Image: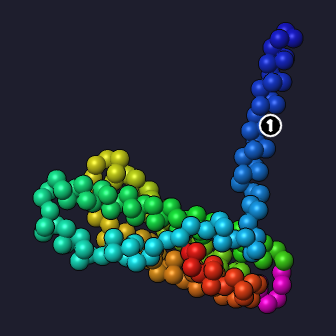
Amino acid sequence: MIASLIWVLLGLFFCAGCAIVVWYKLFQLSNCTANNVVDFLRHVDCEKAQLLLDPANERSLCTVLSARELRRAQRHNALLYKECLNRMAHNAWILMQLANREELRGHPLTLEFAQALQQECVAVRAYALVARTTLMFCLASGSAITLTQLREIEGISGLESYERLKAAAGNLFSRIHPDQFQEVLEAL
């Protein structure tokens, strides 16, 4: 009887500890502030991503490569684009946290720009989530991968929304840290 009670209490403590860790990870803001945001950002090569999504590039691969080489090249390109998506989503997450902090401050000069950045972050993360899921399904199932289909998903153009996110981040940073404005844009 006492042994069972001890096991139940240990189980409850374990579950409570897991719940605390999950809550902390989900709802706590990182140590990312306007002063050190550049350290947390990952550079996205938008020109390379644009090339990966280019229909003309896809057609040229089809004409010069054998079927086996084409599948290998498509898989390689899909993995490269998945890395771009991971970086885009990561940067959107970091900038969302920063925009949330600015919104909580409620400063009238930055509030509108923080809200605009939040909207762009949501669009980029939504696009990245659906595009990564589609890519992972194609990669796992061995289905044919055509990246040109990922240019726009559910009305969200991935690279255009990322460019808008960069512009919104630039607008916010030009108000809160004008000295880091260019450094942030280069990090994105």
Q: Residue at x 87, y 11 (%)?
A: 2
Asked if residue 48 lies in the magenta stretch, the reply is: no
Q: How many marks?
A: 1
* Residue sitting farthest toward the right: 2
In the rendered structure, the answer to whether residue 147 lies left or right of residue 21 reads: left
User: At which x and y percent is residue 92?
Assistant: 60, 69
Residue that label 1 marks: 16
Q: Residue at x 72, y 51 (%)?
A: 25
Given the image, on which type of amino acid does mark 1 rest? Ala
- Magenta span covers which residues? 106-113
* Quadrant of the frame with the N terminus: top right
User: At which x and y percent is residue 36?
Assistant: 73, 70
Q: Is residue 143 above or below residue 166?
A: above
Question: Quick one: label 1, few (<14), some, or many (20+) residues within 10 Å?
Answer: few
| 11, 166: nearer the viewer | 166
Asked if residue 112 lies in the magenta stretch, the reply is: yes
Q: Is residue 82 above or below residue 115?
A: above
Q: Main secondary structure of the magenta part?
A: loop
Quarter of the image holding residue 165? bottom right
